[in-house]
Amino acid sequence: MSVLNKFVVTVLPVIPKAVVGQVAKRYIAGVTLQDAVRVVQELNQKGMMATMDLLGEDVTQVSEATAVKDNIVAIFRAIRDNSIGSNVSVKPTQLGLKIDSEICYQNIRAIVEQARSQSNFVRIDMEDASTTEQTLDIYRRLRKDGYTNLGVVVQAYLHRSEADVTALVKEGANVRLCKGIYDESPAIAFKDRRQIRDNFLKLLRFLLEGGSYVGIATHDDFLIDGAMELIGKLGVKPTQYEFQMLLGVRENRRDQIVQAGHRLRVYVPYGEQWYAYSTRRLKENPHMAWYITKAIFVR
């Protein structure tokens, strides 16, 4: 990380919100659902699928969790009404997980039911490690209740993920595989970059060999190339996997993946909670410091 990048990340809390907003335009669709629909339409025209993601997490009021549920149900209606190629991602803590697991379950179930009525799909996102077990429990309960139009996320940096993948493959799960972004203890998570990469490819092999549909979520060239090599060696059909990237990140590489004939899905975040999401992404990707510098000094 350059000195400039380190400095910008350090002073990020005092950088004006308007400046962060200028940078956030790269990877936030906007504040409204209409903004997200517009961006998805543009992606679809480029041959890319999307996942719409209403920003927010750690809800502490039942009424707020209910409102989030209603807003996410509305996303599916917008997908239907605008005939766009997108599914939806949800975070358990934005739907009440830290209030009451039953409230969270019922909210997610209502969303999954709406998606099923439209032959669509819900990705239950994975958050910090304190929620992993509860998230998997909710996923499995929904599967037991007859819902098949949903999937989960596995984070490659967690020590437990190999055991989770082994079980999920047997269950025929649809899995989004990512590195993981939360700052977890070395007691439960790999901290070395090479270890995380190696585990990612190891888990990807387990998933592909086991017949699971996999969302290969990474912007890392090493992992993209490794995944493509693995797909070729195993003779995996193009309909059995997709690459996934965040809006506004590595767009040239994203285009190359599509041009090479692979399915690709872009996560399209939107909503009032854009600032918290943006500052977290900037901390995760300090090379974005250059864009902040331009927003401050270049007019």
Image (cartoon, helix red, strand yellow):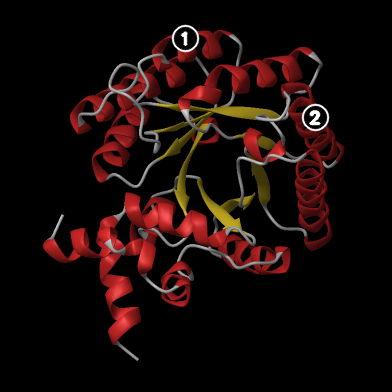
Q: Is residue 105 above or below residue 294?
A: above
Q: Which mark is residue 208?
A: none
Residue at point 39%, 38% (across, down): 181
In this figure, which residue is indicated by the disc labeled 2?
109
Left or right of 137 on screen, residue 127: left
Q: Is residue 285 left or right of residue 42?
A: left
Residue, x 80% and y 48% (percent of image)?
A: 67
Task: Name the N-terminal-most of marks 1 and 2.
Answer: 2
Q: Where is residue 236 shown, x and y percent of the image? A: 44, 27
Identify the element where label 2 is drawn.
Answer: helix
Question: Dots 1 and 2: beta carbons under 8 Å?
Answer: no
Q: Amino acid at mark 2?
A: Arg
Most foreground residue, 171 or 234: 171
Name which residue type carries label 1: Thr
* Residue 85 position in % (x across, y down): 67, 53
Camera-side mark, 1 or 2: 2
**Res. 259 in view:** no
The C terminus sits in image quarter = bottom left
| Closest to the observer, 2 or 29 | 2
Q: Residue furthest bottom?
A: 299
Q: Examine the image and state in which quarter residue 151 appears.
A: top right
Q: What is the distance, in whole Å, between disc 1 and disc 2 at their CAs?
A: 25 Å
Up the image or down, 115 lies above or below 254; here it is above
* Residue 207 shows in this picture: yes
Q: Nearer the viewer, residue 161 or 21?
A: 21
- Give whichever of 293, 147 is nearer the camera: 293
Q: Residue at x 64, y 62 (%)?
A: 272
Q: Which mark is residue 166?
A: 1
Which residue is pictured at 47% across the width and 25% down the height?
129
